[in-house]
Amino acid sequence: MVARIAMISEHASPLATIGGVDSGGQNVYVARLANQLAARGYQVDVYTRRDKETFPEVVKFINRVRVVHVQAGPPRPVPKEELLPFMDEFAQNMLAFCQRQRRPYDLAHANFWTSGVVAAKLKSETGLPFVVTFHALGRVRRLHQGEADRFPPSRPEHEERIIAAADGIIAECPQDREDLLRLYGADPAKIRIIPCGFDSAEFWPIARALARREVGFAPNERVVLQLGRLVPRKGIDNVVQALARLRRDHAIDASLVIVGGETDEPCPIANPEIARLQAIAQAQGVAEHVRFTGRRPRQMLRYYYNAADVFVTTPWYEPFGITPVEAMACGTPVIGATVGGIKSTVRHGRTGFLVPPRNPEALAMRLAEVLRDPELGRRFGEAGRERALRHFTWSHVADGIEAVYSRVMAGERRRVTAG
């Protein structure tokens, strides 16, 4: 019989990936995983919070995948840091929907800690086993962000209860597993390391000249690319400072292109991080060499990756980081920070370089190496593409997830039989 999965993603709907503009890592993770599971015969319902009054209760996403909008709090966008008070209502309304279904679910898969709160409540009331992917951990986040972390102080305690109740825990990289064990005392037998993935039909190598025409880069300029959310923890200020050192200390004429933001046109008012970075670029004397594009649709991102000489991501906190994998999939060399998942996706000296976060001197030195030696960049790009295809496709991710599901469901069948 076909297994039925209740995927919970309270703040990140897979529907956001359709337009490609306003979708973050968790939206993509849930959408691509649901797609893969459906192709393997699973029936998947994705439960997400209704954040618009006009949304229908149920939307067909693809064949065998539905998105269920759950009433929980006001039907408008609410920052994910403020969603905890609505999770009881989410659980109650999700349970009511589940009880109207002709056949029960075999498993729930919670994404993010607030979804885990819902899954743990459902398990306590109905016995439904669940798997959780945290995507980020509260104690790690607080360690790096301090008072800038706006999540409730009770988050780690909720995470501890979720970890204790979960039947399976998916760590996205070795550092994630280590944090679960060291900071939360998680049972190692529950944990399986399964990374995030990329879609090979979405990211692939394109001739640089063609990609540059598509995004409007000059044919011969040296381009350093930064792509992703524009928030302080991404360490983009470090890249701006490294550009200044690259030009001053290494005499390399290069530009930095920053893709991302809250609006289609770069707007310092809508995205204060742009204003902060512009001020840093001005102070460093490189303002005319730093370009902000604003946000871009997902279908355009492959052209930016392929148009760049080198992709850079040097956050000082990053739970996994999918952008280095996407860049590698496009055959672009990557320089990343030795943090979180990046230090396990980028192979130092093979697919690119790893540098300490908040160290513009070290970053400038590695940028100079790649930009001075196009052959080195080509070798890094080829090795990165090969590594991405071998380890980080969504099919590879689904293989691992399916193995976790099978183990949990087999354990549940044994429990029911014994009972």
Image: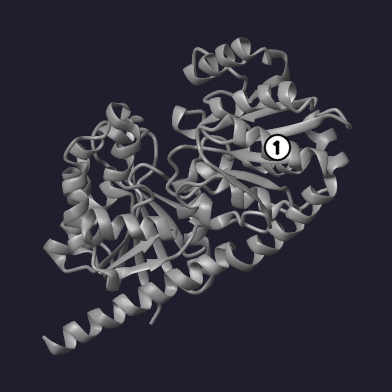
With 332 as the anchor, is 339 left or right in this view?
left
Residue 120 position (above or below residue 234): below
Residue placed most toward the observer, 157 or 166: 157
Locate residue 90, reporting x and y percent: 22, 46
Instruction: Say if residue 300 shows up in the picture.
Output: no
- At a point 18% along the width and 62% down the height, the residue shown is 164
Describe the element under mark 1 as helix, strand or loop: helix
Residue placed most toward the observer, 85 or 293: 293
With 59 as the anchor, is 347 left or right in this view?
right
- At a point 47% along the width and 46% down the height, the residue shown is 339
Position of the C terminus, as image quadrant, is bottom left
Locate residue 256, reporting x and y percent: 69, 27
On the image, which quarter does residue 105 sit in? Answer: bottom left
Locate residue 296, reporting x and y percent: 63, 33
Give the residue number, with chain letter if any, for mark 1.
Answer: 367
- At a point 34% along the width and 59% down the height, the residue shown is 178
With 77 as the anchor, is 209 left or right in this view?
right
Locate residue 66, reporting x and y percent: 43, 56
Kind of residue at disc 1: Leu
Residue 152 position (above or below residue 189): above
Residue 106 position (above or below residue 195): below
